[in-house]
Every structure is written in structure tokens, then in C-alpha cells.
Amino acid sequence: MDPEEVPIIREGSFSSTPESTLAQSQEHLGQTINELQHKLQDMKVLQDFTSTLMLFHQGVDEILWDVARLAVARLGLEDCVIYLCDHENGELVQCSAYGPKNPHERQILNPIRLRIGQGIVGSVAASGKLEMIADTRKDPRYVCDDQPRLSELAVPILNDGKVIGVIDSEHSQLDFFTPWHRDIFLAIAAMAGSRIAAARFEQERYRLATQDPLTGLANRGELMRELKSRLDNATSTVAVILLDLDYFGDMNDSRGNDAGDELLRAISERIQKQSPAGSLVARSGGDEFVVVLNVDLEQSKVESEKLRECISQVFAEGSLVGLHIACSAGISVGINGNSAEDILNQSNFAMYEAKRKGRGQMCVHDSVMANHRRREQRIVQDMVRALESNSKAFNFHIQPIYSLPSCKIVAAEVLARWMHPELGPIGPAEFVLAAERTGNIHLLGETIFAQAFECIHKWKSNVQGILFHVNVSPIQIQKEQFVPQLLRQLEKAQVPPNMIACEVTESALLGDEALALRVLDSIVQHGMKLVLDDFGTGYASLSTLMRYPFSSIKIDRQFVKGLPHEASARTIVSTVLALSREMDLVCTAEGVETNAQLQVLQDMGCPLIQGRIFSDAVTPDAFEKILQSR
């Protein structure tokens, strides 16, 4: 190189340039590496958060606290508050937090509610679009929560395009949040939204599987699971109180299904409020409620009485104002190792015992009741065998019905009887109820009808002008084929339909009212009479007489029993007789046993009498002799 071409380097002209450039490059590289490390750390947070969200057992609360603590806290941010939308009230509710709002485990200091559209957070909830504010002092929408901060990032939590919440983070530095923060928060919100929706779906599925849809109480399936768990883990006794509303069907029929549903909801609220802490309250079906408590027998009796008293209070407001409804209760107590199904069945059996004793009472399942239950089970089994084998163990007696003042037999009631080969005579109150419960009432009715119609045909020459009453179960009335089957039996026995009257109680008219009306109309249209039995003991007897084609009524024996001395009995009987005359109905007084009762009934103008004063129920042979001697 030519010496003249050698550049002249003056002192200090480039003395620092190489070193400065290198330092700047190293600083920039260090910043880049630091940013990359932070981003890798943030990505690790997202990865861990994603794994946490996959825990299927998580509920919505757990997910929200995970977002705040496992995600936001590890991103190195100052604070975070997560809101969920309460669309019904148009509000945002603070549900979890990290930072000054959350100094203790799952506790939010002074939680606030925002209207959707209020503040930056409310705007995000309304628009569904994130907001990244560099200087909150310049944004009039900013709402100061616990303390003012200078920058804010609010991201919507979406599901199916609908805002379900907002993740809101603030920072004390101006323009703190970056596009990277935005993208991280969007990813967290997207994952959280999907998992919250899944958790809510699971909660709803579980609710539908375990709760009664009308009252919100535990359903029968959940009741059995919880009862089994308590018995399996019991160190003392577990009590089951079964509560059944009295005459709910009558009330539901008269006021309608909507009123019935409202009553069930109101009763469920009363039971929940009255039940001790730690109780399980369930609706096991219909108008039956169950309370499970970890108490002994004596305490369960006390709690049962409190519950019955609470339920029976007269409603003072709403559409149920003035309504009073009582309930019957059955109690059973179990210990570790007992079957949940057995304990529940025992309380159910005890409840039915309470109803049989007159309703509005409480019964406890004990050894006596257990024996009664075993007897009932045997009755059911033996009844089925006897009916299916056409055993003569089932037969009938007849009780004459006399006219006043002539005292002539004008009618007779056919009464089913059962002579058990080992247990002896079993009353209708036992076996008819068992037949109804097991669905054998149709076969029992056909058996008794066939025998009675055969005798009526045999007595034909001696029973002219006598109307034979046969008792018809409510369950038989709820069967469309009842009348055709009855007519076939009459035809087979060569008995004209006009010699038959069907006795039914008001309970026969519950259930499918339209079906009951068709069956009763068919009875009358085919020439038979229709008699309303036990008049005055039901819920709506007057409306029943107006809606259905009855030609006769029978005054229940409980009113006749009070004659002649009880003023209330005299009033009721005289009123019923006056009503029957006005409505052109034939009236029969049942259970007449004394001359004093007979005299007052005759003085009141009662046309027909049935009872021991003239004749008890007798065998067909004995009745035939009565016919021959008249």
C-alpha cells in the first residue's frame, strides 16, 4: 500500500466507537433474551394453567380462583379481579381476585357490583371487546375500586359469543400493558370461558339428576344415596321422618294443578326452615317429603311434631291465603349396617298407619308395626294365591236396607269377606286396601261380583223390587273397561242391570276426572244406579253431586253415631236430608244401631235405614231365609 494512502488517524476520533457498539448490542441482546425468558415463563404459566383446567371435578368457583392465583399471580402482575355476569339483574359480580383485594384465602375485600355498561369493565361486558387503557386518568369511564391505578387491561370471558364474565387487571405504571399481555389474557379468558361453560353444564346435569325440579329439594335418587351413606358411616342412630300431606289430592282437584304446585313449593320451604342443621330434606314423590337426621328416636319424635305443626299453619298471604293443610308422619330409626331401602319403607309403612288412624297423626315403626307389616305382606301373598286359584275363601255377606216407616227391605249391600285358612276372618279394611295397592282389586271385584250375581239370579223370584248395592273401588273406576266387564258378568248370570247400584266414594273421582265421569255416565246409561257412599266425609261433596250422575247418597255412620244427643250430628244429618230432598236424591243412613237413633231419623224424614237395628251383614243363605220370611 502506498504510504500516501494510509489514513491518518487522529487521536480520539474513533477511540470509543467499537466498544460502544458492542455494549449496545450486548444490552439489546440481553433485553431480548430477558423478554424471551419472560415469554417462555408466561407460556409455562399458560401450559400449567391449561393442565389445571382439565381437572374435571372443578366447579366454577375453583376455576375463577385458579385464573387469579395460578395464572395472573404468576405473570408477575400487581392485581386482578374477575367478574361474572348476572344477566338476570344486569350486573357484574366480583367472584375472585389476586392482590390487595384478596389478602386472605378466597376472600375479597369489599366486593362490588357493577352495572353491565358501567365503567371500563362494564363496557367490556356490554361490547364483548377488550379494553387496554394506557392512562386511566384520561378515561372518564374509570371506576376506582380499592385504590386508583394508572393503567388497566380488561378482557371478556366468552362462551358461544356471549359474555359470561370479565378478567380485569390494573397496574400502578402508565402504559404498562403490552400486546403480549393482551394476547396472554385473551388466551387465559378463552380457556376459562370454555371450562366455565363445561362446569356449568356439569352442575346443571348434576342438579337435574339429584334435585326435584318443582321444589329444588333432593329427589328420591339423591335421598337413597345420602341415606345409604349416612347409615354406612353411622356411629349412632339415623332417623327418617316421612311426611305426607293429608287430602292433598282433594285440594289439588278443587283448586287446580298450579295451586297444588305452589302449595308443594311453600311446604318444602317450611320444611327446610324448620329442619335442624345437617338434615337432608327431600321430596320422594307426589306430596311426600322426607327428612333424614342423625338423631335418636326420642329427638326424632320432637322434630316430627315441630315439622307437622309448622306445615299445618294457615297460610296468611299469597294465593294460598286461608288454606290449611295437615300431614301424617311416619318415623323409622336405623343404625350402621341397616338397608336404606328398608328404613325408608318402614317410615312409609308407619306413615300409612298414621293415616289409617285418622290422619294428622304420627306413628313410629316398632316391633308391633313390624309384625303388622309382616301380616300385611302375608295377606297380599295369600290373597293373590286364593284369587288366582278361584278359592272359595273369598265370598260375600249381605246387609239389608230398609225403608221407613214401612220397615220393608228395598235394597241390600253386597260386602266382600275373606276366611283365611290359618289367620281366620280378615276384614275388608285389610284385604281391600292390600288388593288396591297390589293391583288385584279388579280380580277381587270380579270374584265377588260373580258370586253375588249368581245368588241374585237364584233368588230372582224373591228379590223383585230389591236393589243390590255393590262396592266399587276408586281404582276400578279409573279403568275404561270396568263397565263392559261388569255388564258381561251380569249377562252371564242373567241379572238385569236395573237390579244393581254401584257404590263409590269421593276418592273414586280423583285422578283422571274425565275418565271417571265417562265410567260413571256409562254405569247410569246402562240402567244401573249410582250411589255416593260416606257422604259428608270428603272434601267437595256438594260439587260432586252437581258434576256426577248420582241418584242416591249414604250418610256416613260417624254422623249417625252422634244421634240423638250431639247437636252437631243432628244438624249435619238434618241438613243432608234436606239437601237430598231438594236434589231429588234417595238418602240412606248407615250404621243405625239403637232405637233412639232410629226414632230421630224417622222424625227427620230419612227414607232408608241400614244397620244392626234391623239386621247385621249375613251370609247369602241367611239372607235368603230373611227374604222368605218377609
Image (tube, grey):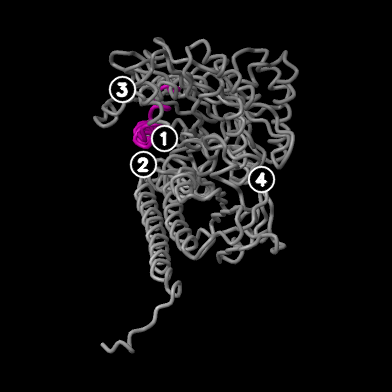
- Please tell me how crowded label 2 is: few (under 14), some (14-19), or many (20+) other residues with Cα within 10 Å: some
Q: Quadrant of the N terminus?
A: bottom left
State the residue at coordinates (62%, 54%).
Answer: 88
x and y percentages locating residue 8 in the rendered image = 39, 82
User: Which of the two residues, 196 or 463, is positioned nearer the viewer here?
Assistant: 196
494 w.r.t. 116: above or below:
above
Would residue 194 be found to the left or right of residue 560 on screen? left
Q: CA distance from mark 4 to mark 3?
A: 86 Å
Query: Dot 3: few (<14), some (14–19), or many (≥20) neighbours within 10 Å?
Result: some
**Marks 1/2: CA distance?**
48 Å
Per the image, the residue denoted by label 2 is 489
Task: Tell me which label, 1 or 3, sits earlier in the chain.
Answer: 1
For mark 3, give the secondary structure: loop
Label 1 or label 2, whichever comes before in sequence order: 1
Q: Tell me the kind of residue under disc 2.
A: Gln
Q: CA distance from mark 1 to mark 3?
A: 44 Å
- Image-quadrant location for residue 569: top right
490 drawn magenta: no
Residue 371, image quadrant = top left
Which one is closest to the eye, mark 1 or mark 2?
1
Pointers 1 and 2 in contact (C-beta within 8 Å): no
> Can you identify the residue that label 4 sits on?
146
> Label 1 vs label 4: CA separation?
43 Å
Checking the image for residue 222, the label placed there is: 1
**Residue density around tag 1, few if under 14, some if 14–19, many if 20 or more, within 10 Å:** some
Residue 534: give its label: none
> Is residue 142 left or right of 450 when viewed as pictured?
right
Q: Of marks 2 and 4, which one's residue comes earlier in the chain?
A: 4
- The answer to whether the residues at label 1 and label 4 have Cβ atoms under 8 Å apart is no
The residue at 71%/35% (across/down) is 579
